[in-house]
Image (spheres, grey):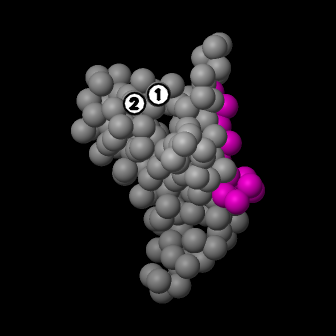
């Protein structure tokens, strides 16, 4: 089964593609213009540093993201398990915005796709991607921790 955000006529408008296989495993390709998005876009963090007047506040913000990513994911899981569309939408938007602010490009794009599913009432499709959310959330947190926060210290 293929789950994708299709444009008119069923063609994908971007390079994203999500598949749920018969075994229940989910394959996710998060792309832009045919290229895989970076796990963490350091240019976003550099822009944040400039906006807030230095790296200390940006590092603190990134650390807050690392500390809270599991909590954000848990809220999403719980909302989807309860089939609570409003709470799921709130949780996925929180994850999307926080990811965008720290340059978590893949996790942000995944959250955008989940938001589309949830808005369209596809809570089961969104729930099928929770393992992918956990994987990308953990990888984003590790990349921020070791590739940005600790590296700059």
Q: CA distance from mark 2 to mark 1?
A: 5 Å
Q: Is residue 38 visible?
A: no
Figure label count: 2
Q: Is residue 104 above or below residue 82?
A: below
> In the image, what residue occupies the spot 65% across and 68% down?
42
Q: Secondary structure at mark 2?
A: loop
Q: Quadrant of residue 26?
A: top right
Residue that carries the numbered disc 1 in the rendered image? 125
Q: Nearer the viewer, residue 21 or 54?
A: 21
Residue that carries the numbered disc 2 in the rendered image? 122
Verify CB contact (< 8 Å) between mark 2 and mark 1. Answer: yes
Q: Secondary structure at mark 1?
A: helix
Q: Nearer the viewer, residue 117 or 95?
A: 117
> In the image, what residue occupies the spot 30% across and 45% down?
90
Q: Quadrant of residue 131?
A: top right
- Percent x, y of residue 109: 54, 51
Based on the picture, tell me whether residue 38 belongs to the magenta stretch: yes
Q: Residues within 10 Å of mark 2 (few under 14, many from 20)?
A: some
- Percent x, y of residue 142: 64, 49
Based on the picture, tell me whether residue 116 belongs to the magenta stretch: no
Q: Residues within 10 Å of mark 1 (few under 14, many from 20)?
A: some
Q: Nearer the viewer, residue 25 or 147?
A: 25
> In the image, what residue occupies the spot 63% across and 73% down?
43
Q: Which mark is residue 112?
A: none
Is 109 displayed left or right of 40 in the figure?
left
Residue range highlighted in magenta: 26-39
- Percent x, y of residue 72: 40, 43
> In the image, what residue occupies the spot 24% across and 38% down?
86
Q: Quadrant of the N terminus?
A: top right
Q: Residue furthest right?
A: 35
Q: Quadrant of residue 85?
A: top left
Is 149 displayed left or right of 51 in the figure?
right
């Amino acid at each position: 089964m293929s789950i994708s955000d299709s444009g008119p006529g069923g063609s994908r408008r971007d390079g994203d593609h999500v598949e749920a296989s018969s075994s229940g495993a989910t394959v996710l390709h998060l792309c832009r213009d045919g290229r895989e998005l970076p796990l963490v876009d350091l240019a976003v963090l550099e822009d944040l540093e400039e906006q807030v007047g230095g790296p200390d506040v940006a590092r603190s913000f990134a650390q807050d993201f690392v500390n809270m990513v599991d909590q954000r994911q848990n809220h999403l899981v719980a909302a989807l398990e309860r089939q609570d569309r409003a709470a799921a939408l709130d949780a996925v938007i929180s994850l999307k915005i926080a990811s965008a602010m720290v340059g978590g490009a893949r996790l942000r794009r995944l959250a955008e796709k989940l938001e589309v599913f949830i808005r369209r009432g596809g809570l089961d499709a969104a729930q099928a991607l929770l393992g992918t959310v956990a994987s990308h959330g953990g990888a984003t947190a590790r990349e921020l921790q070791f590739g940005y926060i600790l590296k700059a210290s």
